[in-house]
Amino acid sequence: MQYKSQAVAKPYFVAAIGLFVGQIVFGLIMGLQYVVGDFLFPALPFNVARMVHTNLLIVWLLFGFMGAAYYMVPEESETELYSPKLALGLFWIFLVAGALTILGYLFVPYATLAEMTGNDILATMGREFLEQPLLTKIGIVIVALGFLFNISMTMLKGRKTAISMVLLLGLWGLAIFFLFSFYNPHNLVKDKYYWWWVVHLWVEGVWELILGALLAFVLIKVTGVDREVIEKWLYVIITLTLVTGIIGTGHHYYWIGAPEYWQWWGSVFSALEPIPFFAMTVFAFNMVNRRRREHPNKAAVLWALGTGVMAFLGAGVWGFLHTLAPVNYYTHGSQITAAHGHMAFYGAYVMVVLTLISYAMPILRGRAANSPRAQVLEMWSFWLMTIAMVFITLFLTAAGILQVWLQRISTAPLSFMATQDQISLFYWLREISGVIFLIGLVIYLISFFVKGESRVGAQ
Amino acid sequence: MSGTFTKSMARNIFYGGTVFFFLLFLALTYDTNQALPKRDNSQNLTPEVIAGKKIWETRNCIGCHTLLGEGAYFAPELGNVYVRRGPDFIKAWIQAQPTGAPGRRQMPQFHLSDKELDDLVAFLKYASEINTANWPPNIEG
């Protein structure tokens, strides 16, 4: 560790991994509810489990991003963090607020939770992914502002690199676009239109800047390739991302009441959205091939390459699969969407956070890399989780194709529930893949506790 | 990439491209907002519809259902349920939950009053009259 204030990243990473485990457990519960409909009902209705599943994902990725920033920015800026105390304080505030929100979802009826937390003053709840009570949303803004203040002040007093500028831009964008979660007009079309300014402009916009910055940082460290080269790539990739992704928002505006010219704007620009992801894959492999050093942390290199490939497949290929308006007319709101959502989130954001954790955690624990035994386990977990996610995606895609056919295309369309009965085999297969994913995750956890000789001491 | 294409050129293209396309997005958004009143059924945003939307939100309906194709994919599309089932069926169905049929997906009982049920139905009627470019492909949603 070059700067001792980087150590504040560690609790963020630990919390991220802990919440990740929770996310997967709730995912498995929901997967079972797809086929055994009354499982855990009425103690845990599907909608509650889904809220917990998706909100935990968002929160743990935010923990991961923040931890990554606290780790990266001092090193990039070549100076200690502006305030490690603020970083630790915000950690506990965010963790407690997050835990209280999840407990609220689980143990208080949602309508009561809304009443208790000021939803009557400003109604923001009950919209997908933005289910958080008003108080939690305000808390997120406060934590984000404190975090951004800390990171920005650190950068201002130190070296300003392209990587840290891009990271900061992504993080500010994340905070700014979250403000649209407070805008909930009565007009359903406008509600949906601006809801996407949080959701789409996050995951297909500013989050990709964060993704690019994290990946570029790790690639510089593990390959030793010249910073100039890597940062030039980074700019090219994020240019492609935003040039395609901003207008690409239009692929959500086809069927929600917006003007029909969005079918053209959305189709054309989002058809180009795989390009930045493809560039990212080429970038990762290219840099590793041109490496000037053999970094002892092989697992981190594997995660970095995996991020490139899986982000391209999940976000790029599976996104393209249903993004053209004439296709989306049939696939919109089906299991195809779910398939894409799973592999895109895993391939892009889960994997990049795990890449950064894989690289940084050993250093935070006083060694350049984990012991070969620990790394072998970590790589096993990489393959198990990644292959399990590929199968989850394939089974959901199969379910989606059948669903679209039976319910929307065939000459004698079945009802929604009759269709669900027909495709339950694929939901069972998805659930089995989910169990494999959990096994991979358990192995991942174990890899942190495997002892053994590490090859090189801390830097 | 050749040596003539420098990092600062890449940076300038990034900032220029981002600003240009974001401004284009804002322009399209402005135009969309001008065009919406012809499509979004906002003339029917009555107090009942507004109250119904709040019930929709505070019962987290989107956690299982889709509305105009967005939401969870666990339960039927409700953007066109008013057309598919009609107001009386919708109210009776909500009041009859959960079915308790073994192994079947269950919907919670929300204990809505008659007024709340009417508001919710008003909201679903309003949603069904938004011009969605003929989506969904058929009545099953």
Image: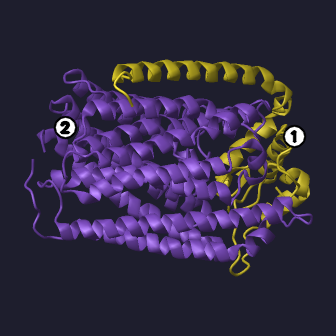
Chain colours: A purple, B yellow
Amino acid identity at mark 2: Lys
Q: Residue at x 68, y 45 (%)?
A: A323
Compared across the picture, whether B110 is left or right of B48 comes to left
Task: Report the side of A415 relative to A284 (left or right).
Answer: right
Mark pair 1, 2: CA separation:
54 Å
Residue A221 versus residue B67: which sits nearer the camera? A221
A317 relative to A243, above or below = below
Secondary structure beneath label 1: loop
For the residue labelled by badge 2, is the local secondary structure a helix, a strand or a loop?
A: helix
Provide residue B95's location: percent of width, then percent of height. 79, 63
Looking at the rendered structure, the kind of residue marked 1 is Glu
Chain hosting mark 1: B
Circle 2 crowding by C-alpha within 10 Å: few under 14, some 14–19, many from 20: few
| Residue A43 in sight from this viewpoint | no
Count the labels in the image.
Answer: 2
Is A377 rendered above or below residue A200? below
Of A204 and B6, which appears nearest the observer? Answer: B6
- The residue that mark 1 highlights is B129
Q: What residue sits 12% from the left and 70% below the top?
A: A452
Q: Nearer the viewer, residue A105 or B25?
A: B25
Q: Image quarter for residue A44?
A: bottom right
Residue, disc 2: A85
Q: Quadrant of the N terminus of chain A?
A: top left
Residue A239 point in image, percent of width and height? 48, 29
Where is residue B115 shown, x and y percent of the image?
80, 48
